[in-house]
Image (cartoon, rainbow, N blue to C red):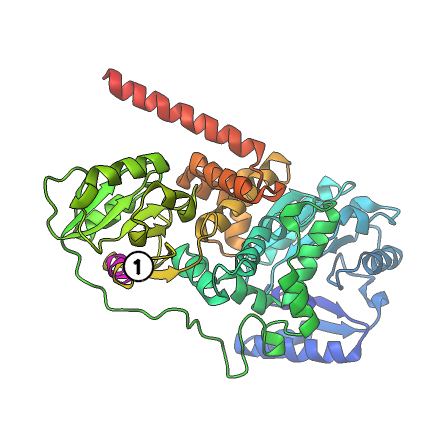
Amino acid sequence: MGSGIALAALFAGMEVVLQDPYPESLENARAYLEKFLERKDQGDRLERVHLTGSLEDLAACPVVIEAALEDLEMKQGIFRELERICSGDAILATNTSTLSVTAIASGLAEPHRSAGMHFFNPAPLLPLVEIVRGAESSDETIAALFDLAEALGKTPVEMADTPGFIVNRVARPFYGEALRLLGEGAASPGAIDRVLRDGAGFRMGPFELMDLIGIDINTEAMRSMHAQTYGEPRYRPHPIQVRKLAAGTLGRKTGRGFYDYSSGPAADSDGQEATVPEASGQVLIYDGRWNLGAGNLIAGAGYRLEAYPDHFDGLAAVVILESSAGRISTELERLGDALPAGVPVFVQCLDTTLEAVLPATSETARFVGFDPLFLPAGSATTLTGAPDLTAEVRERAEMFIRSLGREPVWMDDVPGMVAPRVVGMLVNEAVFAVQEGVADAETIDLAMTLGVSYPKGLIAWGAELGWGRVLAVLEHLQAEYGEDRYRPCQLLRRWAREEARRERMVALNRAVT
């Protein structure tokens, strides 16, 4: 990371002193800088970097950015030495990603000239820099680091000194929920990655990303967050991570992690693109709160949507976007024997499991749980089948989903499915960060899109999905697991109530007019 920050400064035309006590590390740094400067046809800028093993050579630097290992005592010792060596006007910044900036500067005589300046890897490429205000950081220090970040071509965002800051805190559920899904036997790492990457729009799936980051680094971030928050269950590490550490399978750097890289980059083999069947015929659709574009997608593919048809003309599927098991039972009983054999019945499974719906009908062999919230969003979507799902219904369900331009990914019947569960927890974490004053909503959204390339800012994503829908997923998770881990943020509950009031007012105005 230190070499990456130095490279960003060299690209910006600055003079750099790069210090490391280990000669081998300095030689590796020189090779790294030379390689990337020459690639950009800027090899002459290597003359602007001075590599040294001594902290004393940093004496004249106006800003020193520490990027040592995530060890509090080590960083405190380095900062005390830097304060002794550097002039009284020098700013001392730490690139820590999880430790308290205030704690790192606690032994300084002048803590006002310290703050956090957290870059993201690879530092020369990623645009975000988190500027972290410690308890004693002065306005002048924060302003100077903002100016420096902008001079480096970065986008700085300011936040309070809380565990994980913005990005490393808010991103925890992306890994934590994926690990829990894997631990529950819901699906393979490849299938979970596929749904979140191709279905929800993330640049990489969580298991791909953990392999890239290093499972050891990711696990240590989880442990640090869990320890600093006195055991907050949302940040609890998973035993799967501990087993990976014990086995030494840490991701790409060891050749194996959640994927095997011994023969080159791992490929997602959990599904193959199939020919898109022609969409024709009729879809019996029951609208409800979970219709956020699913109906439009089905109609746009070429199906005729009907709620109460006089007869069935090439019925392709029944799609139920309702929450109530009673409503599902009533509608199916009304259809009775009229429903042709082999026609799949798709039931939303976001605030219910398929298992909970099945007792409402005796015809369980045709039931398929699906995710209507993210069905319109991407190219892959989650399905779960009843225990006695017939081969004919499974095949016809897959054909129907493929006719919508989506690839089905089958998983076990787990609460919240995959994308709604992971994204719902991410949104909840972002709202917690707003409520706790880490930063405002706009800053958090900017940080998550620039820092980890999320497809949308999480506050904006929550509003788009609907706060009431996000709340329903979280309440379902909390009820199913009985864990405080899934408790909805109080601010999210308030936003959901405000949203519901607005919707009632709109409905009332329509009724009056």
Residue 12, image quadrant? bottom right
Between residue 15 and residue 445, name the one nearer to us: 445
Query: Which residue is label 1 attached to?
Result: 406
Determine whether, in the image, residue 366 is placed left or right of residue 502: left
Q: As rendered, which of 188 and 6 lies closer to the eye?
A: 188
As helix, strand or loop, the secondary structure at mark 1 comes to loop
Residue 365 higher or lower than 352, as above or below: below
| Residue 121 point in image, percent of width and height | 60, 63
Residue 504 percent location from the top left of the image: 36, 23
Residue 490 falls left or right of residue 70: left
Residue at the limit of the structure toward the top, as seen here: 512
Q: Is residue 395 magenta?
A: yes
The residue located at (80%, 51%) in the rendering is 104
Q: Position of residue 256 (x, y in %)?
A: 58, 76
- Which quadrant of the rendered structure holds the C terminus? top left
Q: Which residues are magenta?
A: 394-402
Residue 413 vertical placement versus 320 (above, below): below
Q: Quadrant of the N terminus?
A: bottom right
Residue at 57% over, 42% down: 486
The x and y percentages for residue 433 are 60, 40
Q: Nearer the viewer, residue 363 or 251?
A: 363
Does the image show residue 387?
yes
Q: Residue type at mark 1?
A: Arg
Q: Compare residues 277 and 411 and report the one nearer the observer.
A: 411
Q: Is residue 72 magenta?
A: no
Q: Could you classify mark 1 by the number of other residues whose Cα lies within 10 Å: few (under 14), some (14-19), or many (20 or more)?
A: many
Q: Quick one: which residue is furthest to the front in this view?
A: 362
- Using the rendered image of the protein, determine whether residue 150 is visible from the camera's viewpoint: no
Q: Name the residue rendered at 38%, 43% in the picture.
A: 359
Residue in the image at 84% along x and 51% along y: 88
The overriding secondary structure of the stretch rendered in magenta is: helix
